[in-house]
Image: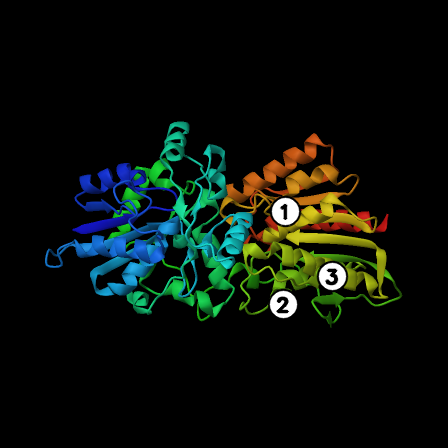
């Protein structure tokens, strides 16, 4: 028998767990939603300041209320902000906890306040300013009905549920977000399950890809006691899919779930390290700072195709993106066609790094244009996957020397969990200003629904403004199709796209 102790996210109280709790009880479990001090009406604040430590004490009280001799195991469930007091409490009672469930939440770290996990980047920056100014006793106003998307996707939440969520929302004490989490490290021994909400942008496949990049910091996610589940819904599954969530929690408590594959060793090569489907010897690499140039023999200057890798890619990933077979293969292929092929590396290590990555790309392109072997007036940019939002700058004000913009299986709008609604990285908006710039878009027919919807939004916007968009479909292609799908299914589209890009560069 399991006791599920559940902690809600920012602005919300025990009411969000009602349907899920009822299903857990019907299945034979015990469910207890923790009323948090200063948030839940059942636990009003008695002091001027409510901090993260206050909420950790609330969770500890719930743990201690479970009879240790009853034989019932405790499963702690933290949603959104709620994972911070959950982890803090588990660190102090590790022997009492059978499993911690991260419900569409991050991985809190010692010494880091919860505000670091606030998804909306603009709001997070404002909170940092308030904290640095010494404001620790105020509150953060709850979202209005139309503002919940700043905190996560509301996919699947009906109008009635969203109205109730808004009506019952309360201010979040600022101290709960700015007070650092203090951990002894004892929580590391507690088994963990991550429940990812795909419509919010988090999937098991995405986490596996991050692990495959080889960052040692993510190796902990491949340990045997760590499991994962995925729900096809938005950030509030207790409202949109309570039955499915209850089932997942019961299975997590039983130790079930998907386990990630460790990187390296005898594991199959991850997508980004598999061979490029075209064997192009190409010229020797010429490394110049963040760019690798592959320059054909003969007189120049020549047009250049600059290939921009996707991401985010952890800073500790090895090998580095410019050495991935696909990026090298594309650059050598362009050189074999008489162009200067360029692989450009940028520092998109986290979704908060798009500004920095954009600056890296702009500087790298100028370095390429300054090379005497390159025709500075004939440049094409080719983006992949998570670098798709970075196309927005080039679509908004395309310079005269940019003769073509291409993108392969791109993410063409920030995913909900990225918190980038207030940023400039929205290609569907930017394409309206692209003018006569040719855009070649390679679309994967078997793309994940979350990414595919961003592509369709872009295609619709491009059609509405009569942009020069050429769609190149790979009907059975998956994300990273050039290395994960059979060449006979992908090469025709890849060759068509390369021909189109070169035509735009040479006409």
Instruction: Residue 175: give x, y in percent of width and height.
Output: 40, 54
- Mark 3 vs mark 2: in front: 3
Residue position for label 1: 425
Residue position for label 3: 363
Dot 1: element: loop
Q: Residue at x 70, y 50 (%)?
A: 495
- Graded by Cα atoms within 10 Å as few (under 14), some (14 to 19) or many (20 or more), the crowding at tag 1 reads many
Dot 3: element: helix
Mark positioned earlier in the residue sequence (1 or 3)? 3
Mark positioned earlier in the residue sequence (1 or 2)? 2
- Graded by Cα atoms within 10 Å as few (under 14), some (14 to 19) or many (20 or more), the crowding at tag 3 reads some
Reply above or below: 109 against 238. Answer: below
Residue position for label 2: 323
Instruction: Residue 55: give x, y in percent of width and height.
Output: 31, 53
Q: Residue at x 67, y 44 (%)?
A: 441
- Graded by Cα atoms within 10 Å as few (under 14), some (14 to 19) or many (20 or more), the crowding at tag 2 reads some
How far apart marks 1 and 3 lie (CA) works out to: 18 Å
Q: Residue at x 75, y 66 (%)?
A: 294
Mark positioned earlier in the residue sequence (3 or 2)? 2
Q: Are marks 3 and 2 in contact (CB under 8 Å)?
A: no
Dot 2: element: helix
Reply above or below: 199 against 376. Answer: above
Residue 222 vs residue 297: left or right? left
**In the rendering, which numbered label is found on residue 75?**
none
Q: Residue furthest front?
A: 48
391, 343: nearer the viewer: 391
């Amino acid at each position: 028998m399991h006791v599920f102790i559940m902690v809600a996210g920012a602005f919300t109280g025990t009411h969000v767990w009602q349907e899920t709790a009822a299903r857990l009880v019907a299945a034979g479990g015990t469910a207890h939603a923790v009323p948090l001090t200063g948030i839940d009406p059942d636990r009003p604040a008695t002091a001027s300041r409510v901090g993260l430590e206050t909420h950790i004490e609330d969770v500890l009280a719930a743990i201690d209320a479970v009879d240790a001799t009853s034989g019932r195991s405790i499963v702690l469930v933290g949603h959104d902000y709620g994972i911070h007091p959950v982890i803090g409490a588990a660190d102090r009672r590790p022997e009492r906890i059978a499993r911690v469930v991260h419900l569409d939440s991050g991985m809190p770290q010692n010494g880091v306040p919860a505000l670091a996990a606030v998804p909306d980047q603009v709001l997070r920056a404002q909170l940092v300013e308030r904290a640095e100014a010494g404001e620790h006793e105020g509150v953060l106003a709850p979202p209005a009905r139309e503002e919940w998307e700043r905190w996560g996707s509301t996919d699947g939440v009906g109008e009635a549920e969203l109205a109730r969520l808004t009506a019952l929302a309360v201010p979040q004490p600022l101290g709960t977000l700015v007070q650092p989490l203090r951990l002894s490290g004892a929580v590391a021994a507690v088994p963990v399950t991550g429940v990812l909400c795909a419509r919010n942008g988090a999937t098991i496949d995405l986490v596996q890809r991050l692990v495959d990049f080889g960052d040692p910091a993510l190796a902990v996610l491949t340990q045997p006691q760590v499991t994962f589940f995925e729900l096809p819904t938005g950030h509030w599954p207790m409202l949109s899919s309570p039955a499915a969530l209850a089932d997942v929690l019961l299975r997590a408590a039983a130790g079930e779930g998907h386990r990630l594959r460790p990187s390296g060793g005898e594991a199959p090569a991850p997508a980004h390290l598999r061979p490029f489907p075209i064997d192009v010897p190409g010229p020797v690499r010429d490394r110049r700072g963040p760019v690798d140039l592959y320059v054909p023999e003969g007189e120049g200057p020549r047009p250049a195709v600059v290939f921009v890798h996707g991401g985010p890619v952890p800073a500790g990933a090895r090998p580095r993106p410019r050495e991935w077979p696909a990026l090298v293969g594309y650059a050598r292929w362009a050189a074999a066609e008489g162009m200067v092929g360029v692989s450009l590396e940028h520092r998109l290590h986290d979704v908060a790094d798009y500004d920095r990555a954009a600056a890296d790309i702009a500087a790298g392109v100028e370095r390429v244009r300054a090379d005497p072997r390159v025709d500075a007036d004939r440049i094409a940019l080719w983006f992949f996957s998570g670098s798709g939002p970075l196309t927005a700058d080039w679509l908004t004000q395309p310079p005269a020397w940019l003769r073509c913009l291409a993108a392969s299986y791109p993410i063409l709008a920030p995913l909900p969990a990225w918190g980038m609604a207030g940023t400039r990285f929205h290609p569907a908006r930017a394409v309206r200003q692209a003018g006569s710039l040719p855009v070649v878009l390679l679309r994967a027919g078997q793309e994940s629904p979350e990414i595919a919807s961003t592509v369709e939004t872009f295609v619709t916007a491009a059609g509405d403004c009569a942009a020069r968009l050429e769609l190149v479909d790979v009907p059975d292609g998956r994300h990273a199709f050039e290395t994960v799908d059979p060449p006979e299914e992908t090469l025709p589209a890849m060759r068509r796209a390369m021909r189109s890009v070169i035509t735009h560069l040479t006409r």
